[in-house]
Image (cartoon, rainbow, N blue to C red):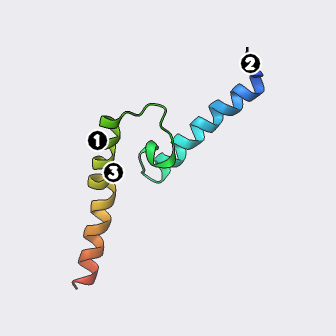
Amino acid sequence: PISISPNEAQFLETRKFQINEIARIFRVPPHMVGDLEKSSFSNIEQQSLEFVKYTLDPWVARFEQSITR
C-alpha cells in the first residue's frame, strides 16, 4: 500500500489551499489555474460564463470607454 507521511499530507492540503487563494485573489475560477478537483463539464461551463460576466466584462467596458473618448 502507498502511504504518505503526515508532513506530506499537510503539504498537499496547503498546496490545495494556495491554489484556491490564488484563484480568489485574481478573481479567476479554480479550474483556470489547474484545480479540477471539484469540477465537472457543466460547472466549468457555468464558472467560465460567470468569469466573463463578472470579471472580464467590467474591464472590457472600461477599456471601450477609454478608447471612445
Quadrant holding the C terminus: bottom left
Residue 8 picture location, percent across and down: 74, 28
Q: Amino acid at mark 2?
A: Ser
Of residues 54 and 38, the one drawn nearer to the viewer in this rendering: 38
Labels 1, 2: front one: 2
Left or right: where 4 falls relative to 48: right
Mark 1 or mark 2: name the one nearer the start of the chain: 2
> Quick check: 69 above or below 13?
below
Mark 2 or mark 3: name the one nearer the start of the chain: 2
Task: Name the outermost residue toward the top.
Answer: 1
Of residues 36 and 57, the one drawn nearer to the viewer in this rendering: 36
Residue 47 picture location, percent across and down: 33, 43
Labels 2, 3: front one: 2
Quickly name the residue at label 2: 3
Labels 3, 1: front one: 1
Residue 56 picture location, percent across and down: 32, 60
Of residues 44 and 10, the one drawn nearer to the viewer in this rendering: 44
Q: Disc 1 versus disc 2: distance between alpha carbons?
A: 36 Å
Left or right: where 43 falls relative to 17: left
Circles 1 and 2: CB atoms closer than 8 Å:
no
Residue depicted at x 29% and y 47%: 50
Q: Amino acid at mark 3?
A: Phe
Residue depicted at x 56% and y 43%: 19
Quickly name the residue at label 1: 46
